[in-house]
Image (cartoon, rainbow, N blue to C red):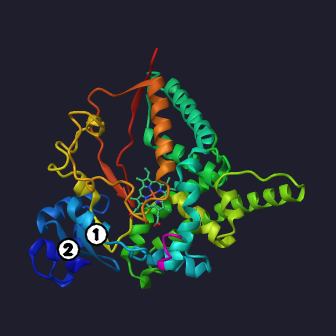
Amino acid sequence: MCDLIATSITGKYKTIDDLPGPSLATTAYWLFVKGYADKSHLMQVEHKRLYGPIWRSRFGPFDVVNVATAELIAQVSRQEGRYPVRTELPHWKEYRDMRGQAYGIHVDTGPEWHRIRSALNPKMLILKEVATYTPIIHEVVSDLLQRVELLRLRSSDQVTVSDLASELYKFGFEGISSILFETRLGCLQEEIPRDTLRFIAAVNDMLALSETVLFFPRWTHHIFPFWKRFVQAWDDLYDVARILIDRKVKQIHDQVERGEEVEGMYLTYLLASNKLSLGEVYISLTELLLGGVDTTQFHLCHYAVSHDESNFPEPARFVPDRWLRDNPSRSQHHPYSSIPFGVGVRACVGKRVAELEMYFALSRLMQHYEVRTEKGAPSIQPKTRTLLIPSKPIDLKFIPRV
Ligand code: HEM
């Protein structure tokens, strides 16, 4: 695949060894001395400038080909077969092996990945199925609205909600858990239950430590504290997920015993479909909760591409009109210049649910409030924490519409 890409650029075959790019030591220098460890998206942009649209980089055990134009991303994506080849997650695999757990959708590859993905897909991706989650998502959105109202009224100017991103994060967590585990976790309550706090902290720790753990070789596991904390985070995650699932299994069992009809959402469907073992259900729901963690032998540099002036003029400016259909100001971008959920058989399995949550939350918030920034508020840059998150709290004014 690498050969084909190189051919399209230069007209002759090249191997990975012919590609330009930083050595492992140079990458370490960029990350830990130049301070790009939590800004790896900006490193993409800088490396594209230095090495061109295709370069090689080494990160921990990975030897990666980075591609940073929409055309190259399209070319790589179109060559994926039935079982897309993905970079291993050796640290996740090591943890699963250590605990004797099933591998799951992120770690499994080939036909095994396909078997699990086929079991997870229908109730996540078929529109008619996803539409059945509408009532529960609306219930969670109502809780979000109440929370925003409470926080703004409690603020000194009676309109500001501080650190909105953390409220939205809790909303996302509550929304997806209510579908997956068919249980309300209470993330948007004033007093968040202890187990839920443990769950949220474990997700944060796991995502925050995932890149660090990867960078240091196995033999350092006993020297630095990262591996121990990474294992603890996974243990907590798995433990809470197992408790929630076991509770549901018991409920279903009791209902069947009483001759009652069993109804439910995602977990009930997975258990009833009998396509996965119970161990695979534990892992699958934990992984779905984590959402997609971006992995490819080819590193598709979405950030660099979606900030490319030639696709999106003034890429850093908030111009929602560029997305409106049938609008003269709609941007004329390459279809692969913005693919937030990926494409093809391995694209995001949670895409439909994520869209449902975002559309409902946004539309209902906008119906109730006009949202403004504080005058003179500084712009807030993203930072990398496996995924991109805001580097500082975002405080916004929610002014009720009359
Ligand atoms: C705005 C929210 C989200 C975005 C932008 C997003 C984005 C992505 C991306 C880019 C991928 C990788 C696709 C690829 O490599 O081609 C992915 C995979 C994945 N996502 Fe999401 N995602 C979101 C929400 C979710 C949610 C809510 C769930 C859970 C229901 C989820 C579950 C997954 C899983 C399990 C994978 C791995 C699929 C596989 O490897 O077969 N994501 N996501």
Q: CA distance from mark 2 to mark 1?
A: 8 Å
Q: Quadrant of residue 386?
A: bottom left
Picture layout, residue 13 above or below residue 357: below
> Residue at image x 45%, y 60%?
292
Packing grade of label 1 (10 A; few <14, some 14-19, many >=20) is: some
Locate ligand 1 by image quadrant: bottom left
Instruction: Verify whether residue 234 appears in magenta.
Output: no
At label 2, the amino acid type is Ile
Residue position marked by numbered label 1 in the rendering: 76
Is residue 57 toward the left or the right of residue 356 in the image?
left
Is residue 185 toward the left or the right of residue 293 in the image?
right
- Residues 63 and 214: in front is 63
Please say if the residues under marks 2 and 1 sit with CB atoms less than 8 Å apart. yes
Picture layout, residue 40 above or below residue 260: below
Percent position of residue 269, x then y: 67, 58
> Residue at image x 18%, y 70%?
54
Q: Pick whichever of labels 2 and 1 is earlier in the sequence.
A: 2
Please provide the residue range marked out in magenta: 105-110
Residue position marked by numbered label 2 in the rendering: 5
Picture layout, residue 285 above or below residue 8: above
> Residue at image x 52%, y 46%?
172
